[in-house]
Image (cartoon, rainbow, N blue to C red):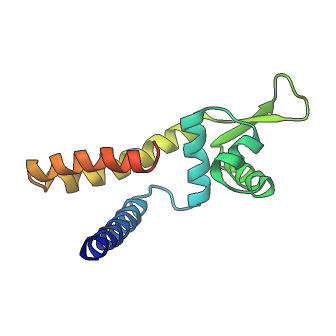
Amino acid sequence: MAESDAERGLASRLRLAVVRLTRRLRAQRVNSAISLTQVSALSTLHKCGPLTPGELAAKEGVQPPSMTRVIAALEEFGFATRRPHPTDGRQAIVELTDAGLAYIDEEVSAREAWLDKRLAELTPEDRAVLSRAAEIIDRMAGQ
């Protein structure tokens, strides 16, 4: 029973730590005019490359009508553009613009700069533990 309680305790501590770290990283945003949903869609386009709106909606776990609104907002910001699908005239391809790529790069840089400062405050031993933990968390997340 004690092992089960310890495992539950670890799960709770890990969940809270990840939530708190995520919250702190989100606070480092460079432009709060764009929603987190829009940032997520941009990040997916950055990671996966050009996608149809349906593919982007599926990857983001939202309904296509919601993604249509997200894409429209990203186009208004100049961060994404649509072009005709090369083989299906009913479809479009959504891709990052140069401004969208620059925005994502700036967001990542701001968050990593904050995290670099926090990591620099740790001992080399603590950084080594976090390096190993990052590998394990990636594996847990299925990455």
Residue 14 relative to residue 83: left or right? left
Q: Is residue 34 visible?
A: no
Residue 132 relative to residue 67: left or right? left
Using the image, determine if residue 45 lies above or below residue 22: above
Please name the residue shown 66% across and 43% down the image: 78
Q: Return the x and y of residue 133 as percentages of the image width and height.
A: 27, 50
Q: Return the x and y of residue 139 as percentages of the image width and height.
A: 39, 45
The residue sitting at the top extreme is 86
Please name the residue shown 26% across and 70% down the image: 3
Towards the viewer: 134 or 86 = 134
The residue sitting at the right extreme is 90
| Quadrant occupied by the N terminus | bottom left
Towards the viewer: 108 or 14 = 14
| Quadrant occupied by the C terminus | top left
Q: Return the x and y of residue 119 as percentages of the image width and height.
A: 20, 52
Towards the viewer: 142 or 92 = 142
Using the rendered view, name the quadrant where residue 15 is placed: bottom left
Please name the residue shown 66% across and 54% down the image: 61
